[in-house]
Amino acid sequence: MPRTFRLPAGLVALALAGWIGTALLMQGMAFMDGPGSIGSFLWLWIAMTAAMMLPSVAPAASLATSVGRSGTVFVGAYLALWLVTGVLAFEAARGLMGAGRWIAAGAILAAAAYQFSPLKDACLRRCRSPLGLLLRHGAFAAGLGHGVVCLGCCWALMLALLALGVGSMFWMGAVAAAIFVEKVTGVGARAPAPVALALLGAAVWVAL
């Protein structure tokens, strides 16, 4: 099998391990009272990031290897950036879990509004077309850069997930599917609007 296809296959396997790890970690955490300690939350965040993000970064990793960059370094830098954001996610989760349903609904509405923003559009376009980034930079810098535009594309969806319940495999799967459709599929450029409508419905559900 050509080397270009090995790495994405490995990423799919790691993503599957991330889903299994997330399910196991969730069993040991009490989400009704808060996200737990920052240490336990960061372990969960690592597993969630692997589960949700690796399938959508697989094409970029494959492209990295095809232009002579290390796919492993590229993905490692990408994941390192997302790990750092786990500290912010922990604080957001703590705030949302104690803020009541109206604040949670407001956060989801904000995520829906962001879907129509110029920044979202710019980040999504760059996330879907990483070739220029890979040609200009080495694997580590390109991985970080791709992580930045991915964060710009997906942070609001992750905020919505925190508001809906970080301990819910259902919502995690729904957000992961939205991220994959937006970043990878042929209809991804048109997906933000339907995703925003789904977020609007989720906000109403949370508020009621």
Image: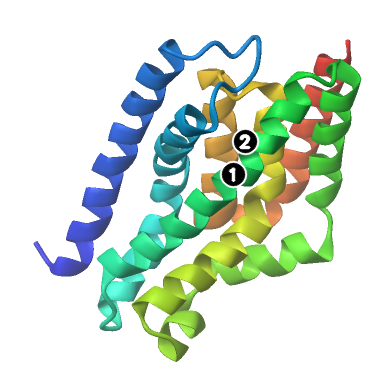
The scheme the figure's colours follow is rainbow
Indicate left or right for 80 with 89 as reference. left
Across and down, in percent, residue 183 comes to: 55, 55
Is there any visible trace of residue 87 in the rendered image?
yes
Location of residue 58 by image quarter: bottom left
Q: Pick whichever, 44 or 49, lies toward us.
A: 44
Which amino acid lies under the numbered mark 1 shown in the image of this protein?
Val
What element does badge 2 sit on? helix
Indicate left or right for 118 with 76 as reference. right
Which of the image's four quarters has the C terminus? top right
Whether the residues at callouts 1 and 2 have beta carbons within 8 Å, the answer is yes
Kindly identify which residue carries mark 1: 87
The residue lying furthest to the left in this view is 1
Q: How many other residues sit within 10 Å of disc 2, few (<14), some (14-19) or many (≥20)?
A: many
Location of residue 199 by image quarter: top right
At 70% from the left and 23% from the top, the residue drawn is 164
Indicate left or right for 131 with 119 as reference. left
Kindly identify which residue carries mark 2: 90
Q: Pick whichever, 130 or 17, lies toward us.
A: 17
Q: Pick whichever, 81 or 4, lies toward us.
A: 81
Q: How many other residues sit within 10 Å of disc 1, few (<14), some (14-19) or many (≥20)?
A: some
Q: CA distance from mark 1 to mark 2?
A: 5 Å
Across and down, in percent, residue 106 comes to: 89, 31
Q: For residue 206, which numbered disc appears in the image? A: none
Q: Pick whichever, 63 or 194, lies toward us.
A: 63
Which amino acid lies under the numbered mark 2 shown in the image of this protein?
Phe
What element does badge 1 sit on? helix
Which of the image's four quarters has the N terminus? bottom left
At 64% from the left and 68% from the top, the residue drawn is 125
Across and down, in percent, residue 73 comes to: 30, 68
